[in-house]
């Protein structure tokens, strides 16, 4: 679909190809993305307001443009999602979230990323960076399941780690992975994630 589109009474589902979106709003029970193979979010604003469980499910995706993904619903990723640009922006309600399924990966290309306005991240899979360091700032809640992993890598040139900063509730189970690169830590040295 093109720019400034409002998806009215349509279900985009079970596609095998790429879906490229621009300025879309999915706002009712009749408007959803269901098991779409790949979605590219370019420049624009995307609102997922369908709060039904499983209403917005994508296998793979990339967020590469300026703008925001938001709304009061959950965007669920079943395989992989590359967060290269943009912001996840909530609706000020506790149903706004990004769900990384068990076995799926959220990859942040480099630098800092953030969510705003009560947009939460539920990590049942893996979160990591391709180039470190960076900070994931969540203005909302962060939940990490026992199946999940948060990978942090030390940039030995600057001694900074990939980090997590959350303004809401934090629930962590699973694994916090730390890669030190070429750094050999001294006894008692501490690192802050």
Image (cartoon, rainbow, N blue to C red):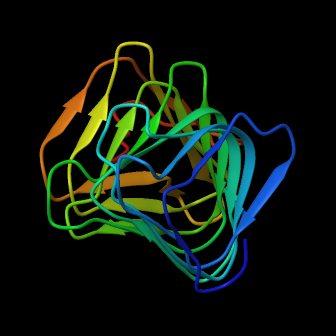
Determine the image quadrant of residue 35. Answer: top right
Q: Is residue 170 above or below residue 62?
A: above
Q: Quadrant of the N terminus?
A: bottom right
| Residue 19 coordinates in the image, percent (x, y) | 77, 56
Q: Observer-nearest residue: 191 or 12?
A: 12
| Residue 159 coordinates in the image, percent (x, y) | 53, 58
Determine the image quadrant of residue 180. Answer: top right
Determine the image quadrant of residue 4. Answer: bottom right
Q: In this view, does 108 lie above or below 42?
A: above
Q: In this view, does 11 lie to the left or right of 26?
A: right
Residue at the front extreme, as displayed: 9
* Residue shown at the point (70%, 57%) measured from the top left: 62
Q: Observer-nearest residue: 40 or 188?
A: 40
* Residue shown at the point (47%, 53%) measured from the top left: 31
* Residue shown at the point (34%, 31%) measured from the top left: 53
Q: In this view, does 158 lie to the left or right of 48?
A: right
* Residue shown at the point (22%, 70%) measured from the top left: 117
């Amino acid at each position: 679909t093109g720019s400034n589109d409002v998806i009215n009474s349509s279900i985009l589902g079970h596609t095998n190809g790429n879906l490229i979106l621009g300025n879309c709003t999915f706002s009712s029970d009749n408007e959803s993305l269901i098991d779409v193979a790949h979605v590219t979010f370019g420049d624009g604003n995307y609102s997922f307001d369908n709060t039904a469980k499983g209403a917005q499910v994508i296998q793979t995706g990339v967020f590469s443009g300026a703008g925001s993904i938001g709304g009061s619903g959950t965007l669920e990723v079943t395989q992989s999602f590359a967060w290269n640009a943009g912001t996840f922006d909530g609706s000020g309600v506790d149903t706004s979230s990004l769900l990384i399924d068990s076995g799926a990966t959220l990859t942040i290309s480099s630098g800092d990323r953030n969510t705003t306005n009560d947009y939460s991240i539920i990590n049942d899979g893996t979160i990591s960076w391709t180039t470190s360091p960076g900070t994931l700032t969540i203005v909302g809640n962060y939940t990490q399941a026992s199946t999940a992993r948060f990978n942090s890598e030390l940039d030995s040139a600057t001694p900074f780690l990939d980090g997590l900063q959350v303004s809401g509730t934090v629930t962590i189970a699973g694994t916090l992975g730390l890669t030190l690169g070429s750094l050999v830590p001294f006894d008692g040295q501490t690192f802050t994630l």
